[in-house]
Amino acid sequence: MDVHVVDHPLAKARLSTMRDARTDSAAFRAALHELTVMLVYEATRDMPVRIERIHTPVARTDGYALASPPLLVPVLRAGLGMADQAHKLIPDAQMGFVGLARDEETLKPTPYLESLPESLAERPVMVLDPMLATGGSMEYTIRLLIDRGATDVTAICALAAPEGIEHLEKTGLPLRVVTASIDERLNDSGFIVPGLGDAGDRQYGAV
Ligand SMILES: O=P(O)(O)OC[C@H]1O[C@H](OP(=O)(O)OP(=O)(O)O)[C@H](O)[C@@H]1O
Ligand SMILES: O=c1cc[nH]c(=O)[nH]1
Ligand SMILES: [Mg+2]
């Protein structure tokens, strides 16, 4: 599995704002928006482009666009905070939605929403979820996509736990992960350490 850590001072700065317990919801959402732009920018770096001739006011030249804009799939709730920014960068993208809530005791994802195109054959997919902890929610989401024929899946996460990366690696699922940090570990409650707390609660309030 290819894991790409976006090790950039500006990404680190946004992530630090998100980590800081003094950051309020509005500032947390703003930092996640900006970090998402950086992560999606890096994740799309090697995507194939379509070239067509265009006219500038001065001359003819090559114009570029993504050959196959990805399907964006935010994982609710926390991934919603990445959806608009990713969509602004890739306006031609379609969007699907998956809703999962992790059980606090078992740490297993409980699905409550699935809105995806029937076939994803030949379509790149970008899953948006700020947190990759045990990896259970990401594995569940990836399996939904693969069941629909997806073969080119990238998970975009603000941060990840080593345990979650290892778990996904062991599944053998075809997947690429782009993240701003691989943190130290998970604690006994399944939270990432040092992490940033509950990414859904920090954006939208506790449920
Ligand atoms: O890797 P895992 O151990 O599965 O944990 C990661 C999941 O936990 C968070 O969602 P949560 O279940 O808290 O739902 P929320 O976004 O509604 O807060 C996060 O956004 C991931 O989806
Ligand atoms: O640290 C964590 C782990 C899972 N989900 C979160 O929102 N935060
Ligand atoms: Mg949550």
Image (cartoon, rainbow, N blue to C red):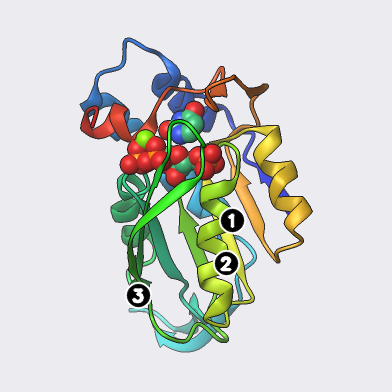
Q: Is residue 37 left or right of residue 57?
A: right
Residue 29 higher or lower than 128, as above or below: above
Q: Residue at x 69, y 43 (%)?
A: 165
Mark 1 or mark 3, which is nearer the start of the sequence?
A: 3
Circle 1 residue? 139
Q: CA distance from mark 3 to mark 1?
A: 26 Å
Mark 2 or mark 3, which is nearer the start of the sequence?
A: 3
- Mark 2 residue type: Arg
Q: Is residue 132 left or right of residue 196?
A: right
Mark 1 surroundings: few (<14), some (14-19) or many (≥20) residues within 10 A: some
Quarter of the image for residue 71 reads bottom left
Report whether the residue tagged 1 is closer than 8 Å to ligand 1.
Answer: yes
Q: Nearer the viewer, residue 56 or 30?
A: 30
Mark 2 surroundings: few (<14), some (14-19) or many (≥20) residues within 10 A: few
Circle 3 residue? 92
Q: Are marks 3 and 2 in contact (CB under 8 Å)?
A: no
Circle number at residue 143: 2
Q: CA distance from mark 2 to mark 1?
A: 6 Å
Q: Nearer the viewer, residue 19 or 172?
A: 172
Q: Is residue 20 left or right of residue 106?
A: left
- Residue 53 position, x and y percent, is 47, 89
In the picture as drawn, the residue positioned furthest to the top comes out as 22
In the picture as drawn, the residue positioned furthest to the front comes out as 105
